[in-house]
Amino acid sequence: MENIKVGYIGCGCRGMGLLKSVVLKQGEKVAAVCDTYEDRAQGAADAVEKAGQARPAIYTDYHDVIADENVNTIIIATAWESHVEIAVAAMNAGKAVAMEVGGAYTLKECYELVEAYEKTGTPFMFLENCCFGRREMMVLNMVEKGLLGEIVHCQGGYMHDLRHEIAFGKENRHYRLRNYLTRNCENYPTHDLGPIAKVLKINHGNRMVTLTSTASKAAGLHEYILENKSDDEFLKNKTFAQGDIVTTVIKCAGGETIVLTLDTTLPRYYSRNFTVRGTKGMYEEVTDSVFLDREEDRIHDFDWRKKCINNAVEYQEEYDHPVWKQYLNEGVQGSHDGMDYLEFKKFFEALRNDTMMPVDVYDAASWMAITALSEMSIAKGGAVMDIPDFTNGRWHTNILD
């Protein structure tokens, strides 16, 4: 595609951050902006103008953006509930789509996303920035080179203290509050699952087959509100549905297991707990450590702290992914340690060159489905749920080089 003209939908905190620090910095033309809150849409238009572009069209209804003949590419950074609805409408209108992450509310949504893509052939990318993290891509490179042996087990988590963001959701017009009040599920699986899926070749010779999810009680938000927002009579007396800790166990067709942890309503440090275990070694994000089963690396059990903690930096020069080596030479930019900038760069490159999107619609459907399935599993006391094959059997033969 030549002459990309962006219709930017969703101008809240995340949306504005990406617009300013990534899309406009990459010099992409933004022809229209949209948010259901007019002040946010006006703020986005101001940002486009400040970047030296003509003031874009301003809308409060996403249908108007999609109908705008000056727009050929839709970027979706809205609340979780509307992602799929907007993406499907955009694809049906022949507009390329980049869709921000979040879990699906139903399996039907996932099928609708795939069906729209297969019917229209419209370019689609799922904006899972963690697939472009430096460490995640380094470990992927190590796995592909066989350094960790045969991969047996992976772990990941979205471990992020969001109590303030959720508790003040009404004031900040943030969608997480309503979700935590009414749903109990693994509501944000893709930051941790995306890089794991790439390691395990999900949809490319492997697939996720079953899951079971268990949620703890919900206590963290209630206590936080009593101590930090005691004047909020509504929330003070509400019972949150969302468990503080949700653990999801996934079994893959290749025999591998995955453990995902959602941990967002108790005090803690930030982590995605990216962990890869193989027959010849492991990587662990929490300690940023690599351990290889080699004679020179053998250590006494109690000496691991001296040998392993933060030693992954020693592997960077040799095993940084080629994409990141080039990125480092060009200069890392943007938010989230450069992940956001890199993912959008790859999206726009694929769009211009008409090549495969690095995170495609089948990735989106299978990863987002974990949310809907986890909600069902938790409601049934940790029941085992079958994970659909959104590739319709093509995962067997769709092998990447």
Image (cartoon, rainbow, N blue to C red):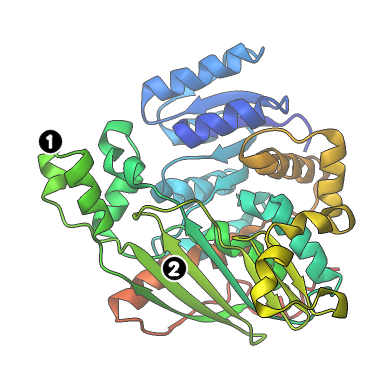
Q: Nearer the viewer, residue 275 or 40?
A: 275
In the shown orientation, is residue 315 left or right of residue 286?
Answer: right
Q: Which amino acid, by three-letter code, is at mark 2?
A: Leu
Residue under label 2, please give it.
107
Q: Nearer the viewer, residue 269 or 103?
A: 269
In the shown orientation, is residue 224 left or right of residue 372?
Answer: left
As displayed, is residue 207 above or below residue 115?
Answer: below
Residue under label 1, please give it.
231
Residue 63: percent from the left, percent from the top?
45, 36
Residue 349: percent from the left, percent from the top?
79, 41
Q: Mark 2 or mark 1: which is in front?
A: 1
Q: Which amino acid, by three-letter code, is at mark 1?
A: Asp
Residue 388: percent from the left, percent from the top?
52, 77
Specify whether residue 22 is in view.
Answer: yes
Specify whether residue 10 is in view.
Answer: no
Q: Which mark is residue 208?
A: none
Question: Looking at the rendering, which quadrant does residue 393 occupy?
Answer: bottom right
Q: What is the CA distance from the residue labelled 2 to the residue labelled 1?
A: 39 Å
Report the residue at 17% width, 57% height from top.
239
